[in-house]
Amino acid sequence: MINLKLLKPKVMKELSSGFAENNPKGVQVQGFMEPESYKKFLAAVAKAKLKKSEVRDTHSYFEADSPALKFFSSREFLAFAAAVTGKKIKKVTCSVRIFLKDCYTLMHDEKKASGIELFFDMTPQWMQEWGGSTVYLTDSGEKLILPPSPNSLIIAVAGKSYVKYVNHLAGNEGRLVVYGTMK
Amino acid sequence: MMRGFSNQEITALSKRFISGKPFPHVVIENFLDKDNVDKSRQAPTRGWDNHKRLLLELKKESFAKKDSDLFTFKQTGNLFYSRNPIVAAAVTMFSSGQFAQLISLISGIRLKPGAVDVSGSLYEKTDYLLCHDDRLEGRKIAFILYLSESFTAADGGALVFLTAKGRHPDKKVFAYPPLQNSLMIFAVSKKSWHEVEEVLADKKRYTIGGWLH
């Protein structure tokens, strides 16, 4: 399922050193799944029945479980994540989330998360002016803005990110991701 | 600058403040009066509306973009340091014993004269402020003076109050679209969950706000 180009030793070494050296620790991978696997994954996720999850001082989004998410607990993914982070990954807890108009997460929500987090993005078309980007704060408080990008994966330390409020310019579009934490 | 209030009106405002839901609040309409003298030039005017004059002068202040997980809008620095005589007069009014006394009488809360962190805010299309409770170091009353033209519900930009459930906000139960020259005051507490709705229209939402301790 993982793009074979990423699994080459040279590329894995680059991802691993990128994770260790970036501030905050993390790495973004484009073209994460093989194209055919990505299509099948998208089709499976599309069947998920999303329900609103909202506590206005922490987050607002729609969320669902999906059988397709078992991929993120597979040996293949756990080995990949362990190689990138240099840590032994035993467990991944994740869900499908969609950020429609008026959806967001706040920093102090995700601060409670410990360990490593993942964002697997499945948003086909997105304008940055709509909001909805994943924003990471560096140790010095600078913003690292990662706009949605389909079939891209972010693996980073948890508690340093938020999803910017999606404004009304997004209309009926939504940012679709898998969000998870790894321990 | 601030208009006069009769004892009868103060009593009525106090009743509305105390019974305000989901937490004590009240809106004072037509808060600033008309002036017959332009104090900056010591020249007579034709009954200049102080809120219009203040808006005109506030627009000359420097507004910096504020952007975080919680908000996107523009804000001045602390207006206490403004060199603009009209803006400075507004800060003096908010910091006066007269203002603190008025708000004390309405809220029934003992307040110190001297407003804290008075600043101007500007919300334009897509700007917003997400849910928070305003609690910080002794804040007792929050006040917001709406200066720009009035908004309709369809324009967005309303101040929204939420009920509390445990330690978190719950349901939106009150929305106040900006009404020109009205002053909103509310009691700051662990239940004072509020937010500013995203501005949906091509309108500029100017306010001056701060806190009393």
Image (tube, helix red, strand yellow):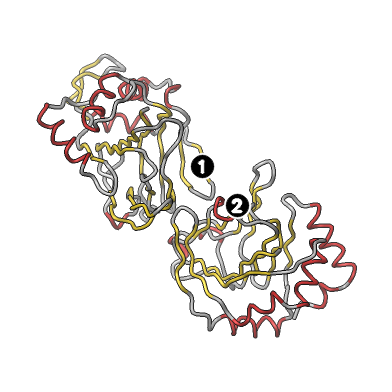
Residue pointed to by mark 2: A111
Q: Residues within 10 Å of mark 2 (few under 14, many from 20)?
A: few
Residue pointed to by mark 1: B66
- SS for callout 1: strand
Residue drawn at x 40%, y 34% is B120
Against B198, residue B117 (above or below) is above
- Residue closest to the far left: B8
Against A82, residue A21 (above or below) is above
Residue type pointed to by label 1: Lys
Q: What's the distance in space between the residues labelled 2 and 1, CA to CA? A: 22 Å
In percent of width and height, residue B159 lies at 33, 48
Side of B96 where A134 appears, left or right? right
Residue drawn at x 61%, y 73% is A122
Q: In the figure, residue B205 lies in which quadrant?
A: top left
Against B135, residue A81 (above or below) is below
- SS for callout 2: loop
